[in-house]
Image (cartoon, rainbow, N blue to C red):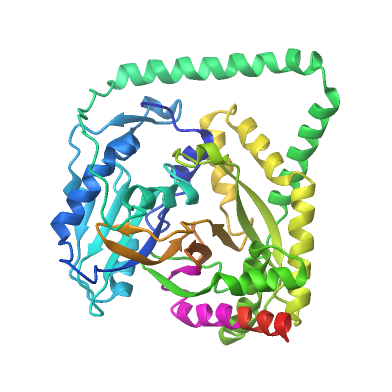
């Protein structure tokens, strides 16, 4: 299972800092069984450990290539201990569990994931926070991590036999030689590109691919205007503000105005920012927003690594009418998709992988800069059927979308059954009132719903 990180995966290592932690994840609450005994922390930890054979990457760590000549590789962790990854918390409030877990960086000397469990919250529920480094998973694969721990039935199926034994990782010399060989292979592939271009039986398709990549670069490199308090220096302290509501509300809005649920999420985010920013003495401007787009085929839903692209849209926070905000977002997202921007961005990312690693990492840091975009809004599909962890029913799961330096906010939405769960992941110092922003986004959905049904 050893493999080298892709250029995109490696970029998430490049943009991480002591203040900007590049983990994705979720915060979930579970209802304990109404009949029978509730599981203890030790039983939940053992349950999680019994499922790790389904995802070998979760017992692997990254190993760097000497002199940074190529991206790191994945190697088995010879000192793997589930107790370093599944940890107990005495928190009696889900919010306290979430904020303490998400404010800590994942150490790079071990597999890059952690699950924090408070097995008895004050309301009787069980709180679970999962996080994994973005170099290892994208948002959908992070949801898949949750699915590895869950079952569609209250009584879990017996765990498969696990005969895992760590393979001895290659030493520095082997990693250096492997990195050089892979780099030479990449350069050889690049050298063949002109021949492939001139012999291509479909030059029109080739020209369109190049045009898509150019359009994607033009959109991504268009400068953004840093806006307080969204683009200010941050510390490691985090807070996850959240709320949930029926998914049917968002679908009703989409049906009424001929838009997608994702358009509704973006428009509600714009409306929420318009309501919220005046409290910080800021007149809400259009905000350049990065929107992750999954390129993961249905057949690859369980694969780890990143299969995402990005589009950039301007949230029309300056537009006072909620319906026009939704229509503007819908038109802009439709134009991006019809122009092949997601696929073009993927082509551009592929081209970057041929550049020297020092250049790749410089591009990654530029792309994550506050002068490139203001915030991130992401729609992550979740489980639609009832799910259980050792008989405890999953009630809600609020997504965590990472933020880079000088970005204090990301907005994520995922679905659990017929509920839409919103997570506003905020840097606590510049945005101490992110709970009020969550209320503003929720109110913006109500505003759209009133127009849809009125």
Query: Any magenta on residue 25?
Result: no
In the image, 212: left or right of 385? right
> Hey, which quadrant is residue 54 in on the image?
top left
> Hey, which quadrant is residue 55 in on the image?
top left
Tell me if residue 9 comes above or below residue 355 in the rendering.
below
Q: Quadrant of the C terminus?
A: bottom right
Observer-nearest residue: 365 or 411?
411
Say which residue appears at 48% left-offset and 57% top-offset: 382
Query: Any magenta on residue 422?
Result: yes
Measuring from the top left, give residue 386's x and y in whole percent: 40, 61
- Range of magenta residues: 419-443
Tell me if residue 176 comes above or below residue 216 in the rendering.
above
Q: Is residue 236 visible?
A: no
Q: Quadrant of the N terminus?
A: top left
Observer-nearest residue: 177 or 163?
163
Say which residue appears at 68% left-offset and 55% top-offset: 312
């Amino acid at each position: 299972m050893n493999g080298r990180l892709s250029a995109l995966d490696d970029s998430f290592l490049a943009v991480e800092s002591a203040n900007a932690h590049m983990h994705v994840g979720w915060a979930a609450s579970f209802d304990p069984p109404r009949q029978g005994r509730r599981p203890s922390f030790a039983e939940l930890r053992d349950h999680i450990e019994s499922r790790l054979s389904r995802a070998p990457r979760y017992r692997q760590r990254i190993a760097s290539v000497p002199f940074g000549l190529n991206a790191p590789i994945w190697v088995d962790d010879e000192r793997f201990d589930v107790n370093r990854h599944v940890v107990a918390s005495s928190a009696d409030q889900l919010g306290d569990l979430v904020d303490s877990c998400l404010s800590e960086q994942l150490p790079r000397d071990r597999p890059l994931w952690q699950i924090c469990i408070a097995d008895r919250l004050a309301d009787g529920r069980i709180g679970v926070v999962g996080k994994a480094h973005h170099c290892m998973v994208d948002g959908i694969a992070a949801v898949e991590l949750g699915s590895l721990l869950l079952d569609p039935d209250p009584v879990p199926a017996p765990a498969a036999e696990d005969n895992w034994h760590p393979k001895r990782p290659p030493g520095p010399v082997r990693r250096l030689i492997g990195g050089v060989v892979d780099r030479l292979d990449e350069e050889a592939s690049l050298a063949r590109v002109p021949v492939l271009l001139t012999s291509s039986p479909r030059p029109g398709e080739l020209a369109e691919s190049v045009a898509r990549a150019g359009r994607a670069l033009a959109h991504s490199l268009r400068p953004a205007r840093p806006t307080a308090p969204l683009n200010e220096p941050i510390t490691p302290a985090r807070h996850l503000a959240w709320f949930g509501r029926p998914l049917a509300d968002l679908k009703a809005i989409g049906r009424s105005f001929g838009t997608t649920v994702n358009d509704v999420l973006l428009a509600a985010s714009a409306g929420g920012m318009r309501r919220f920013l005046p409290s910080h003495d800021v007149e809400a401007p259009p905000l350049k927003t990065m929107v992750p787009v999954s390129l993961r085929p249905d057949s690859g839903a369980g694969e780890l690594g990143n299969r995402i692209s990005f589009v950039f849209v301007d949230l029309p926070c300056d537009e006072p009418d909620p319906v026009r905000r939704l229509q503007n977002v819908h038109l802009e997202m439709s134009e991006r998709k019809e122009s092949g921007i997601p696929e073009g961005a993927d082509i551009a990312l592929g081209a970057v992988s041929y550049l020297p690693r020092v250049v790749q990492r410089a591009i990654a840091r530029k792309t994550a800069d506050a002068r490139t975009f203001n915030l991130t809004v992401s729609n992550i599909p979740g489980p639609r059927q009832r799910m259980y962890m050792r008989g405890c029913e999953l009630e809600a799961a609020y997504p965590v979308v990472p933020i880079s330096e000088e970005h204090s906010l990301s907005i994520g939405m995922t679905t659990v059954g017929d509920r839409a769960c919103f997570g506003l992941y905020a840097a606590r110092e510049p945005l101490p009132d992110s709970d009020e922003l969550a209320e503003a986004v929720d109110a913006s959905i109500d505003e759209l719903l009133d127009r849809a049904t009125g």
